[in-house]
Image (spheres, rainbow, N blue to C red):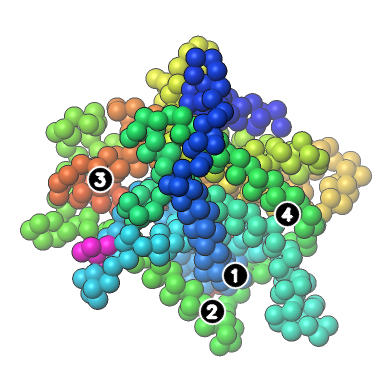
């Protein structure tokens, strides 16, 4: 636990505390009275209420739509499975500003639905909720599906033999085994949607605002650090309470499970019901994920004089405005380098943390578990500003160092590593380790021979998540990325903030490149997975 605790203390707790101190401490005196004053304002209460209920609605809707997809990926074997898994993960690595832009092009003024049927959903809560499902679909599919694929199906089959219906066998055998993984996925979705920024800002306009957008507005637009600090503390306390409840309830439901290699559980769909489910999942993926991505690709080629590669060619030229000190095409290499380093950091920190949480119990460890998830729910704006004001003096003078960006990205990647690996690690029967020890294996060899083969797949999934969120991280990176080495999401956001057809087209082109880079990276990861099967139809 020492290394993860030190990492979070230095790169998370210190920056956040520094920002809060600057906002609430005036002339050496803490202004705690500002809490009541701020939280009694009607507009702030409206923000708090909308943040809560839209996050709950987004989480429920995501689980409802994505859990059938998790089952299909876990239990069915079909041609193109790796490609489809990569496709559903692409939205998760897109900058959230591009998620909002994709749905604006789909459901906004002049969008596809407006052109075809005269339907507009922008500035409505439905656009926000659907965009959140689009963004978080992969969280449920990969987190829940990762464990589901390794559950021994013979346990459910035994219940059927003993007279249980298909529904009762699933409800009494499989669902309890999946509960920790489902809860972990729900928690991540809730935290992401509760701290939603760009999606709400673009699709909600001035009608809707979350805590994250309000913190940004108070910090950047109004320069009111006091109000921003109060809202940050409210967000911090709320997220901490959610994590504490989650850790308490999930820990009680975790048990050792019978696990098998994923290829032993996957098979071709059988019967009308399974084929109908498979077709329904494909249709939902096509409408919810492929269609918005297709709109982005189409806009990247649509110029004022017809379809062409003009926007892509413009990426190779120097920026005439001087905003970017390098050609925009260089942002691709920057993003990949940062993402690789951030993934290695996240795997190291998250792996150690997951191992510690598996072998120890008690209040201290439960608090440590909650600490690891806080970066998902605390404002990235706060973290980004905190980096700038804290990591600027020896011995941690990192403002001019390239490593600052991967460190910020790794903060968001670590929770995914922990939440992906922890259910699998805790599901390993402790008697297997004890048997290895009795036979003379050292702790290291027991881990290598017993744990590693079972968690290798979860480790690869965790690496994919960490790499994905690093590629698409925007909230903190936008404040610390240097002008001579911007990331791709930062470049897209700045292009969208500038008027003109060329800027918009270049943003669409960069977003399309990001999607392709993500898909290729995820496909390469799929080839390294240990659960690839040869069955096709």
Answer with mark 3 or mark 4, whichever residue precedes in sequence: 4
Q: Is residue 477 magenta?
A: no
Q: Is residue 110 magenta?
A: yes
Answer with mark 1 or mark 4, whichever residue precedes in sequence: 1
- The structure residue drawn at horizontal position 60% and vertical position 44%, both measured from the top left corner, is 238
Quadrant in which residue 171 is drawn: bottom right
Q: Verify CB contact (< 8 Å) between mark 1 and mark 2.
A: yes
Helix, strand, or loop for circle 3?
A: helix
Query: Residue 306 vs residue 15: left or right?
Result: left
The residue at which mark 2 appears reads as 277
The residue at which mark 4 appears reads as 250
Q: Verify CB contact (< 8 Å) between mark 3 and mark 4.
A: no
Compared to 237, does 523 lie above or below?
Answer: below
Q: What secondary structure do most residues of the magenta stretch adopt? A: loop
Q: Nearer the viewer, mark 2 or mark 3?
A: 3
The residue at which mark 3 appears reads as 496
Helix, strand, or loop for circle 1?
A: helix
Q: Which residues are magenta?
A: 108-113
């Amino acid at each position: 636990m020492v290394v993860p605790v030190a990492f979070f203390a230095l790169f998370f707790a210190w920056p956040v505390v520094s920002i809060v101190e600057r906002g609430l401490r005036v002339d050496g005196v803490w202004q705690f009275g500002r809490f009541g004053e701020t939280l009694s304002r009607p507009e702030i209460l409206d923000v708090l209420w909308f943040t809560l209920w839209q996050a709950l609605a987004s989480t429920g809707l995501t689980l409802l739509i994505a859990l059938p997809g998790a089952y299909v990926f876990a239990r069915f074997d079909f041609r193109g499975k790796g490609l489809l898994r990569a496709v559903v993960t692409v939205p998760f690595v897109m900058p959230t500003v591009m998620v909002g832009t994709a749905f604006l092009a789909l459901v906004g003024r002049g969008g596809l639905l407006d052109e075809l049927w005269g339907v507009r959903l922008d500035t409505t809560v439905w656009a926000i909720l659907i965009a959140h499902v689009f963004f978080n679909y992969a969280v449920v599919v990969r987190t829940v599906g990762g464990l589901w694929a390794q559950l021994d199906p013979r346990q459910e089959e035994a219940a059927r033999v003993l007279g249980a219906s298909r529904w009762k066998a699933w409800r009494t055998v499989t669902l309890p085994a999946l509960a920790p993984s489902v809860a972990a996925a729900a928690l991540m979705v809730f935290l992401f949607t509760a701290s939603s920024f760009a999606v709400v800002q673009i699709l909600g306009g001035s009608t809707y605002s979350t805590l994250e957008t309000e913190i940004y507005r108070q910090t950047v637009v109004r320069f009111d650090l006091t109000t921003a600090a109060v809202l940050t503390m409210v967000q911090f306390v709320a997220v901490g309470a959610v994590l504490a409840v989650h850790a308490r309830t999930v820990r009680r439901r975790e048990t050792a499970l019978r696990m098998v290699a994923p290829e032993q559980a996957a098979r071709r769909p059988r019967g009308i019901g399974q084929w109908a489910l498979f077709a329904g999942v494909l249709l939902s993926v096509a409408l919810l994920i492929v269609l918005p991505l297709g709109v982005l690709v189409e806009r990247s080629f649509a110029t004022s004089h017809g379809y062409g590669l003009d926007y892509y060619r413009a990426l190779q030229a120097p920026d005439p405005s001087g905003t970017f000190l390098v050609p925009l095409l260089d942002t691709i290499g920057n993003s990949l380098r940062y993402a690789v380093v951030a993934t290695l950091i996240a795997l190291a920190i998250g792996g150690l943390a997951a191992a510690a949480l598996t072998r120890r119990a008690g209040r201290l460890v439960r608090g440590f578990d909650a600490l690891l998830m806080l970066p998902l729910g605390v404002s990235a704006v706060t973290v980004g500003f905190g980096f700038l004001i804290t990591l600027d003096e020896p011995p941690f003078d990192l403002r001019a160092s390239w490593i600052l960006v991967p460190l910020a990205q790794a903060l968001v990647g670590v929770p995914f590593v922990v939440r992906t690996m922890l259910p699998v690690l805790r599901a390993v029967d402790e008697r297997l380790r004890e048997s290895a020890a009795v036979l003379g294996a050292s702790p290291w060899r027991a881990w290598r021979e017993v744990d590693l083969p079972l968690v290798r797949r979860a480790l690869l999934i965790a690496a994919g998540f960490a790499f994905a969120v690093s590629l698409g991280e925007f909230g903190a990176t936008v404040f610390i990325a240097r002008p001579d080495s911007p990331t791709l999401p930062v470049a897209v956001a700045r292009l969208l903030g500038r008027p003109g057809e060329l800027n918009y087209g270049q943003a669409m082109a960069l977003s399309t490149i990001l999607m392709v880079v993500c898909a290729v990276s995820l496909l390469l990861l799929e080839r390294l997975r240990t659960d690839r099967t040869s069955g096709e139809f």
